Amino acid sequence: MNISLYDISVWVIPLVIAITFHEAAHGFVAHQLGDDTAWKLGRVTFNPLKHIDPFGTLILPAMLLLAHSPFLFGYAKPVPVNFRALRHPRIDMVWVALAGPATNIALALVAALAFHVVGYLPPDAAQWLADNLKNALVINVVLAVFNMLPIPPLDGGRVAVGLLPTWLAAPLARLEPVGMLILIGILIVLPLAGSQFGLNLDVISAILRVMTGFIIQLLLVVTGNG
């Protein structure tokens, strides 16, 4: 696999921005709603070094890419939030969780709008910017959609815990310690196992692809690029 510096520049820059803004948004909203845990730890920042998890952000995606996994998976260092410190813990947890995916959708919208600038640049710069914007659009929408899966510790899981009645929210919340293992099983292990028997068990990532494609197309139409 030949990966050039150009390839790295047009993928790493939008990926780092997407992850950094996503995590900083969680910390910022938590701070606004009464919890200053992330603020005191310096996690409400656009410094990517504060948010990158060496294994989850770099090593795991690289391993999956080299292994030709059916789904590319990774994560950043979670922003610590003390939900009990929030003024209205249950509903404020929902707003804190939504902040990350909402920020990614906002970044995707900005990337789609910025396509209108590309035509005013010299050809080489235009191509580089266009590739960055295209990847930024895809990465941010994928991050938003993926994080809204209703499995803790993903944002969608925490939204579900905050909105569901207690008898449903409590058992869902208890899944958080093993949530990442469940995700890896559903998104990576199950499809790979199914392929050994000629079965397509890649259902969740297929749904994610459909939803991601729909949102990308919607953003392009809304910004006059469709």
Image (tube, rainbow, N blue to C red):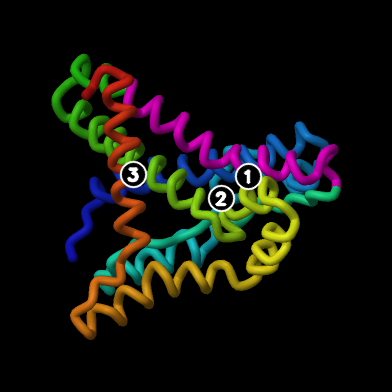
Which class describes the residues within 10 Å of circle 3: few (<14), some (14-19), or many (20+)? many
Identity of the residue drawn at 30% across and 57% down: 206
Q: Which residue, given by chain and number where applicable, does mark 2 sit on?
A: 156
Q: Which residue, given by chain and number where applicable, does mark 1 sit on?
A: 97
Of labels 2 and 1, earlier in sequence is 1
Circle on res. 45: none
Mark 3 and mark 2: span between their CA atoms?
Answer: 15 Å
How many numbered marks are there? 3
Query: Which SS does the magenta portion mostly show?
Result: helix
Which class describes the residues within 10 Å of circle 2: few (<14), some (14-19), or many (20+)? many
Residue type beneath disc 1: Ala
Q: Is residue 180 left or right of residue 221?
A: right
Q: Which residue, given by chain and number where applicable, does mark 3 sit on?
A: 212
**Magenta stretch contains residue 126:** no
Vertical placement of 226 versus 176: above or below? above
**Magenta stretch contains residue 88:** yes
Residue type beneath disc 3: Thr
Identity of the residue drawn at 31% across and 73% down: 191
The residue range painted magenta reads 85-113
